[in-house]
Image (cartoon, rainbow, N blue to C red):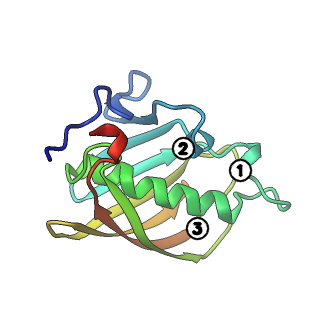
Amino acid sequence: MSETPPATPLFDYDDDPEAPGWKTWRFRDPTRFNAFLEPLQVRLEGDIARVRMMPRHEHSNMRDNVHGGALLGFMDVSLFAASRAFGSLSAGGAVTLDLSAQFIGGGMIGEPLEARIELLRETSRMLFLRGLIVQENTPTIASFTGTLRKSSPPPSFR
């Protein structure tokens, strides 16, 4: 059975007109989890993919820092956005096998939050990545590693 991609890509990955040198990474269905974190910006600089989001009040915890759950969600989505920037994935072409995180400090609401991700190794079916979550003029907020398994499109796209 041949696999064909969906008629319309699930994600937009286009030049960001408001941020030269950056691309937007946006899920086309605003009712999905990704919309909670978006808009996201992506930029490849050498071997590092930079993925940015702007944390809002709904991403905050009781201390007015970025909630750990929002950080974990951002880490996960960033792995996919970074993999797209590396040219390793087309939109939605993988699943997360593992994500390991170490929380180091608090992230501020209203300041751009950035995941800086490197691709450690790519095989025919797997991507191994690691990253740091940072904000300007702030010590590292978190570090993480993740493994993605490249997948076939779901049956509804065949």
Between circles 1 and 3, the one closer to the viewer is 1
**Res 117 label:** none
The picture places residue 102, in percent across and down from the top left corner, at 56, 78
Classify residue 36 as left or right of residue 28. Answer: right
Give the residue pinned by disc 3.
141
At mark 3, the secondary structure is loop
Of 56 and 69, the residue lying toward us: 69
Q: Which of the 4 image quarters holds residue 135?
A: bottom right
Rounded to the nearest whole Å, what is the CA distance between mark 1 and mark 3? 15 Å
At horizontal 39% and vertical 21% (from top left) the residue drawn is 17
Relative to residue 150, is residue 59 depicted above or below? above
Give the residue pinned by disc 1.
59
Give the residue pinned by disc 2.
34
Of 148 and 81, the residue lying toward us: 148
Could you tell me the amino acid type at mark 1? His
The picture places residue 69, in percent across and down from the top left corner, at 66, 62
Could you tell me the amino acid type at mark 2? Asn
Rounded to the nearest whole Å, what is the CA distance between mark 2 and mark 1? 13 Å
Which residue ends up furthest to the right in the rendered image?
62
Is the C-beta separation of discs 1 and 3 under 8 Å? Answer: no
Rounded to the nearest whole Å, what is the CA distance between mark 2 and mark 3? 21 Å
Q: Residues within 10 Å of mark 3 (few under 14, many from 20)?
A: many
Residue 52 appears in the figure: yes
Relative to residue 55, is residue 148 depicted above or below? below
Is the C-beta separation of discs 2 and 1 under 8 Å? Answer: no
Q: Which of the 4 image quarters holds residue 6?
A: top left
Q: Residues within 10 Å of mark 1 (few under 14, many from 20)?
A: many
Of 156 and 38, the residue lying toward us: 156
The answer to which of marks 2 and 3 sits earlier in the sequence is: 2
Could you tell me the amino acid type at mark 3? Ile
At mark 1, the secondary structure is helix
